Amino acid sequence: MKNVARYQREIPQRYRLEAGKCTSCGYIAFPPRLICPKCKSKNFETIKLSDEGKILTFTIIRVSAEQFSKQTPFAVGIIELNDGVKITTQIVDTELDKIEIGKKVKIVFRKIQEDGHAGILCYGYKAIML
Amino acid sequence: MRDVVIIGAGMTKFGELWTKSIRDIFVEAALKAIEDAGVEYIDSMYIGSMSPGLFVEQEHIGALMADYLGITPIPATRVESACASGGAAFRQAFLEVASGASNIVLAGGVEKMTDAEDVTAALATAADQEYEVYQGITFPGLYALIAKAHMHQFGTTRKQLSDVAIKNHRNGSKNPNAQFGFEITPEQVMNSTMVADPLRLLDCSPVTDGAAAVIVASVEVAKNIKKDFVKVIASAQASDTIALHSRESFTTLGSVVKAAEKAYRMAGIKPKDVNLVEVHDCFTIAEILVSEDLGFFEKGKGGEAVENGLTSIESGKIAINTSGGLKAKGHPVGATGIAQIIEVYEQLLGKAGARQVKNARIGMTQNMGGTGASCVIHILEGK
């Protein structure tokens, strides 16, 4: 399912949290976009997002899609990073009942999923509790 | 734009229709609608369907269905807006008649979900594949994120979520076309499997096969064939960010607010004028949010409203999901938007049987895709 080109083109975002910052209005696009949704500018500079933030909302996934079934139950939340960008990510290395809205987290580099037995290993970001 | 009316409707029973194919169920619903309307021809056809490619490996169903209905060479087009595909197809039919380009158009919807290998993965394509689904989130998971935020911000309770499911099953028990036409108890909801905290299995709409169709026409056509009709007094649609996390708020659905504003303005009415509404309760929390975003209740009070019975058929305030909603009637995604129209059409004609809302004159449908990245709203008026 995950063909290599499709996976590889997302690497800057998933491995290094690279985003596009609009040079006109300062809007941060993650992932990068071609046009700013706020001011319609097409000029962006590449920045690295903050790797710390807080939990805005979360859930525990107990019934998952096939490729995540070995990981269940696992937590997924929406994290607001310190620069205001929001991302959806797993919250790991914690007892599930310790997770609360408002708690601080740090973004780390982890394996996300495997594409079957013979496919590529897929990496990206997850959050750990601070 | 000229006035547009609905003059006929037909649908299959919703459920696990193992012995029937996608073409069988669509043709069944479409023939019922054409016969109900009593029209000799139709000018064109729009079919809402989210993903026949993933569910049954068949694209190009516009032509397929025109072929099997025996109505080639009329124009026939599939419309896709995830779970809002049916509502979007109806809107295209409405616009085509309103513009004067056609006089009689069939608006239908179909989904054949039980043939699919991985329904969860197919449905998840309505979210951001690369930045939501990649992380392991599911659709119940996304609505669970909304539920958690709504509970945290407004004190919405677990019991209020259950009350939505219980009320919709009570309504569905009076609908012969419902997939799960039976009542459920609070204990059954709380004992059902946890899918994504706080949402349990009985908070979720089911996997369903089904098709629905209506005939949309000009007033002149309706008068010529001397058919009772219901008038479409508003059609509105809005979009929002594909990813839930990109939004300012997770407890209000911007596309619903925007489409509702446009619809109320077009119809020249206010929320208090609406007698009944079919809302997109893909999960119980969705009905609570939407009942607020449509302006029936103050933000944060949707849970209390259902708990206090303000959304029941008998309430006299606003009857929500008299058909049983997606929860009990079933949710064949592409057909849902059309089935909502059919429920309101039948209510406004006084043909809803045991679930009839007394003195119903104005009804609304709210159909949405993804976590509200698409929303289509229609307002219908009876005599």
Image (cartoon, coloured by chain):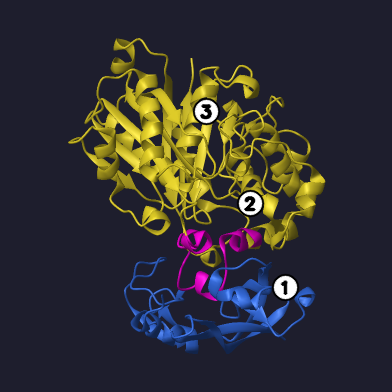
Circle 1 marks a residue in which chain?
A
Chain given the colour yellow: B
Residue A54 location, x and y as percent? 67, 77
Answer whether residue A47 is magenta in the image: no
Q: Where is residue B265 in the image (x, y as percent from the top left)?
A: 46, 34
| Numbered range of the magenta stretch | B117-144
Chain letter for the residue marked with disc 2 in the picture? B
Dot 3: few (<14), some (14–19), or many (≥20) neighbours within 10 Å? many
Label 1 vs label 3, nearer the camera: 3
Q: Which badge, 3 or 2, comes first in the chain's sequence?
A: 2
Q: Residue at x 39, y 47 (%)?
A: B49
**Image side of residue B127 versus residue B195, left or right:** left
Judge if badges 1 and 3 mark residues of a common chain.
Answer: no
Q: In this view, does A71 lie above or below B12?
A: below
Q: Nearer the viewer, mark 3 or mark 2?
A: 2
**Residue B324 in view, yes or no:** yes
Looking at numbered disc 2 in the image, what kind of residue is underneath it? Cys
Q: Which chain carries label 3?
A: B
Q: How far apart are marks 3 and 2 (CA)?
A: 23 Å
Quadrant of residue B180 in the image?
Answer: top right
Element under label 2? loop
Estimate the x, y position of residue B260 in percent, counting from the top left: 50, 40
Q: Which residue is drawn at 68% across and 57% down?
A: B147
Q: Name the residue under label 2.
A: B204
Image-based side of A91 in relation to B125, left or right = right
Dot 1: what SS?
loop
Return the residue at label 1: A102
The amino acid type, in three-letter code, at marker 1 is Gly
